[in-house]
Image: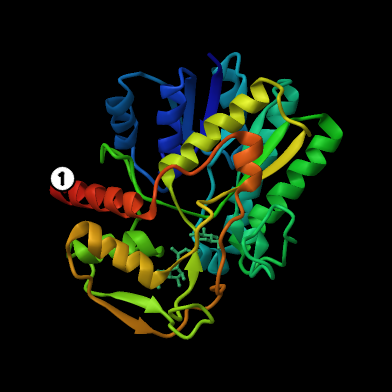
Amino acid sequence: MAKIIVTGGLGFIGSHTVVELQNAGHDVLVVDDLSNTTIEVFERIKSITNKDFEFYQLDLKKKDDVKSLFAKAGKVDGVIHFAAYKAVGQSVNSPLEYYENNLGSLVYLLQEMRDNKLDNLIFSSSCTVYGQAEDLPITEHSPVQSALSPYGNTKQVGEEIILDAIAAHNFNTISLRYFNPVGAHPSAKIGELPLGVPLNLVPYITQTAVGLREQLSVFGDTYDTHDGTCIRDYIHVVDVAKAHVIAVERLLAKANEDNYEVFNLGSGKGSTVLEVIHAFEKVSGKNLNYKIVERREGDVTAAFADTTKANETLGWKAEKSLDDAVADAWRWEQKIREEV
Ligand code: UFG
């Protein structure tokens, strides 16, 4: 059993990862500033796993908070760093806050890891680093392209900061580049909790179906795809969570081949926006009110992962389908609306 710090552990992907870490027998310490989630998630996680864990509300863009985290933590074996702002549009309006939060916290974390002689970091990266890739599916060798938003740039620069830190201080790190994580825990006890109007497709679909939004806008149907809508690789959040457990265990076992490794986390399958809508309509039995509107600025036509490296090297593979993901997202949406 290892002790793992999970930053942003009450967020969407973080909370599902805490569950899988506990299921795998690890001891978890969670830190979250609660800027984009609520403290109830702490109890909800425990109600799934029936196991307690340490939680600290700290702000990792404050160096003193990061220091106090390591002072409290005692002996730790690894860190999974989720804590970050993630709204693409908001990052365009508040770039400095994005750089401060996403990169400041990473630098402080790396400094403390170095000073505490702590190795083994898993970093949340994103397929956004590839931009519109020339070749599909996207392998880890696809070139990183100029970021389309400050948010995307924080992921690119984050990876560069880690590479420089590794060169100087000999850390072992795995960056996981997520495609589009969606869905919720099958228990419907944890899931995505967007504050305000959702920006992402699946929560917008479920909020429309539950009556919270009037209509889903489909951003463009004139893309060069089989039905004209954009293609993405939607991956169930529980599959993403399980990949983190495998990745951290790889570092703990010193089974990594290099001190910096990168893996794509996707299902390997591209789905159009209309296919996601139809999958939702099929599993929910509801007709969705949607309308085709103008393209959204910054959207790439198509992105889906080549997952061969994660399949072969990590022995990880997405097990759940798009239908599973939208069914679980729908069950979660209905459950939280009953509660409020
Ligand atoms: N879409 C709609 N209507 C909506 C919301 C989304 O048609 O109301 C479409 C988008 O145009 C896109 C697809 O649904 O074609 C998926 O959009 P999301 O916003 O759900 O996801 P993105 O692929 O744009 O963004 C995700 C993550 C980002 C990350 C990015 C990398 O949310 O954090 O992938 O490409 F940066």
> Looking at the image, which residue is at 78% across and 43% down?
163
Q: Position of residue 183 (x, y in %)?
A: 36, 50
Residue furthest right as drawn? 168
Q: Residues within 10 Å of mark 1 (few under 14, many from 20)?
A: few
Q: Amino acid at mark 1?
A: Glu
Please state if 181 lies on the left or on the right of 305 as rendered. Answer: left
Task: Give me the residue at 67% from left, 67% from top.
Answer: 133
What element does badge 1 sit on?
Answer: helix
Q: Position of residue 217 (x, y in %)?
A: 34, 77
Q: Quadrant of residue 54?
A: top left
Q: Please state the horizontal and vertical placement of residue 244, each as a whole percent of the image.
A: 54, 35
Q: Quarter-wise, where is residue 119 in the image?
A: top right
Q: Is residue 193 visible in the rendered structure shown here? A: no
Determine which quarter of the picture holds residue 168: top right
Q: Name the residue: 56% across, 26% down.
A: 69
According to the image, label 1 marks what residue? Answer: 339
Residue 120 visible from this viewpoint: yes
Q: Nearer the viewer, residue 138 or 184?
A: 138
Along the line of sight, the residue nearer the viewer: 329 or 69? 329
Q: Is residue 137 left or right of residue 322?
A: right
